[in-house]
Image (tube, coloured by chain):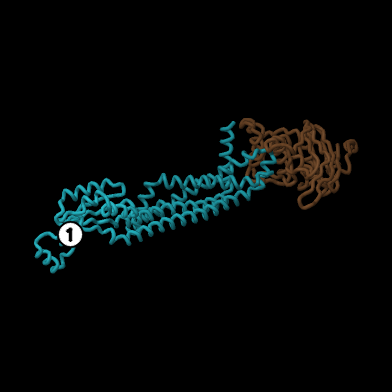
Amino acid sequence: MIKFVNVSKVYPNGSVALENVNLEIGKGEFVTIVGPSGAGKTTLNKLMLDEERPTEGTVLFENVDINTFSRSQITALRRRIGTVFQEFRLLPNKTAYENIAFAMEAAGKSDEEIVSDVPHVLQLVDMADRMFHFPNQLSGGEKQRLAIARAIINQPEVLIADEPTGNLDSRNTAEVIEILKKINDLGTTVILTTHDPQLIKAVGQRIISMERGRVVGDDQRAATVI
Amino acid sequence: MFWIRLKRVIKAGWVNFRRNSVVSYAAILVTTITLAVVTGLFLFQAILNASIASIQSKVDIAVYFTVNAPEDQILSLEGTLQKMPEVASVQYISADQQVLAFRDRHSNDYLTLQALDELGDNPFGGLLQITAKDPSQYEAIAQVLEGDTDIAHDNSQIIQRINYSQNKDIIDRLNNLIFNARRFGLILTLILSLVSIIIMHTTIRLTIYMAREEIGIMRLVGASGSYVRAPFLVQGMLYGAFAWLLTNIVFFPLTYLAGDKLTDLLGINLYSYYTSHFFSVSGLVLLIGLLLGMISSLMAVRRYLNV
């Protein structure tokens, strides 16, 4: 589904974020990308969203090079990929309800769909009673659950979760991971990046290890270890 | 779908405007100053034009006729002059009216009146006072009366003198003054408008700079560039519309006071002018407010859409 072919990324200041990365992620997989800070995990995510472009190599989504996409094609691609960020990246001036409704409006959903689906997804992440709260009125765990709800509302084919538990305590971390697993069980490809070894144990399945911009391990059997 | 999107965009713009109230107040205030400057400049131009018109009306050419000049010939010349495109008005003052005016002017000067009485006959001839539509046209009118024209030839016997040459210096200086005043007014208008537009533009850009992260997030959750941009356009227009309201709230009482107290000094009743030109002046100011709000927002958002 997503393929990195000989991808390198060098930022204008000369720092090498990725070096000759080759990777393939299949439909319905739960992939955990693990590595210390600066290993290139976030850059990998940004390349998948076309937020950054590779210096060398190609990133393919369903065998099409996304770097050749026009702006409208990028917008369409992002509607097929849900994203959850460590720093939540919620819209601060919109309530929990409106944050999710915005993603639906952007995807061209009708008012009826919004009215019926938003409360439902908020219930799914146990946020029904926080529907009309603004992000600054929510705890870290609640913000992240809201970000997940926003990411999955348009039933994306892929969910990228970039250090989603980085700012959460252990109880909230477990909750977030449970939600991600459920989403994966429903058929969505989940790509989780983390530097937390505890989290790796919890998620299992396929684990890709990165160091200094390179893929140093791709363990398909991780799931059986747990 | 277009109407649904339009409704959502307007609602989002209004909600952003309301929720970022501090930023909105600041933007409205600065926009109000811009629109007030523009409105003030419109009124300044009106005062300038009224002053110029008032000075212009005080200048004329006087054609003095001989004592025996037949009145019907003078009246015929008056008719001819009135038909000239350069002429705004022609006033005929008969010899009898002249002598009455003379007596009135010198009512306290016994010696002069006695000398006039001793003359017996009326020493004054008739007089035509000609006002041009523009001071620069006096020369052309004088040329018709003094130069090598049919009118000059036909009337040379009855015209005693024309005071254009005597007034020429004053008229030329007045022409210069009017030209410079207009030019100064235009330059002042352009500079002040430009300065206030730049300030307003910068303020709106700052308000959007504060929302730059939000713009990036919207793009990442799959919103198209136009869908992100549109609510900011609405916000920019709202700044313009509210600033226009505030400008009117300031200018109605201000021009009312000026109309009440300063009409003689300014030569124009500003309140009457403002109310009678409300749609042209205030309408234009509203248009400027809306357009500036929109254009500033558009330019500012564009910078942050490249995500």
Identify the residue shown where x is 26% and y is 59%.
B163
Q: Label 1, on which residue? A: B101
Q: Label 1: chain?
A: B
Chain identifier matching the cyan colour in the rendered picture: B
Please tell me which residue lies in front, B156 or B66. B156
The amino acid on which the numbered mark 1 sits, given as a three-letter code, is Ala
Name the foreground residue: B154 vs B9: B154
Q: Position of residue B260 (x, y in %)?
A: 34, 55
Rendering coords of residue A16 (x, y %): 81, 49
Residue B157 falls in which quadrant of the image? bottom left
Q: Position of residue B295 (x, y in %)?
A: 56, 46
Q: Quadrant of residue A58?
A: top right
Q: Which chain is brown?
A: A
Q: Position of residue A23 (x, y in %)?
A: 84, 38
| Vertical placement of residue B135 versus A24, above or below | below
Query: The C terminus of chain B is located in which quarter?
Result: top right
Q: Secondary structure at mark 1?
A: helix
Q: Quadrant of the N terminus of chain B?
A: top right
Foreground pick, B91 / A201: B91
Residue A144 visible? The answer is yes
Q: Mark 1: few, some, or many residues within 10 Å (few <14, many ≥20)? A: few
